[in-house]
Image (cartoon, rainbow, N blue to C red):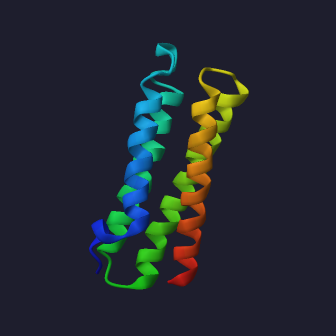
Amino acid sequence: MQDYRKLQIWQRAMKYTTELYKFSTKMPIDEKYGLTSQLRRAAYSIPLNIAEGAGCSSNNEFKKFLEYSHRSAHEVLTILELIMRLNIFNSDGAKELTKEGEEIRAMLYGFMKKL
């Protein structure tokens, strides 16, 4: 069992989730129950699963939760890609968030391989 708050990946995922929430507040109101809601759920799933996995009693179990976080990162990246392709708004913000999301996804993958 690890203190998830000390994990760099959790700290970075929390910051990323905060940025995604700020970004999502500027999305069109007609996306409130669509892409906005889905983006938020996928975003907070990343640090939540890291935290939950850190409480596991084995590395294999922890790895399962990191895999869930990794999948959620892919989901976030796909939603951001949709936002850019649909030209919903502020594609510059989506590009920046995509870059950070790719780095977090890579960190998660590396962490899973390390376990």
Q: Could you say where residue 1 lies in the image, as x and y percent from the top left?
A: 28, 81
Q: Could you say where residue 33 lies in the image, as x and y percent from the top left?
A: 46, 24
Query: Which residue appears at 67% of the width and 37% of the height?
Result: 81
Query: Which residue appears at 58% of the width and 69% of the height?
Result: 109
- Report the side of 15 relative to 99 (left or right): left
**In this picture, is 106 found above or below 39?**
below
**In this picture, is 83 found above or below 110?**
above
Q: Could you say where residue 28 lies in the image, as x and y percent from the top left?
A: 51, 16
**In this picture, is 111 found above or below 39?**
below
**In this picture, is 20 found above or below 29?**
below
Q: Could you say where residue 9 lies in the image, as x and y percent from the top left?
A: 44, 65
- Report the side of 78 relative to 72 (left or right): right
Quarter occupied by residue 90: top right
- Report the side of 81 relative to 38 (left or right): right
Query: Which residue appears at 68% of the width and 30% of the height?
Result: 84
Q: Report how many numbered discs are placed on residues in the image.
A: 0
Query: Which residue appears at 45% of the width and 48% of the height?
Result: 16
Q: Residue furthest right?
A: 85
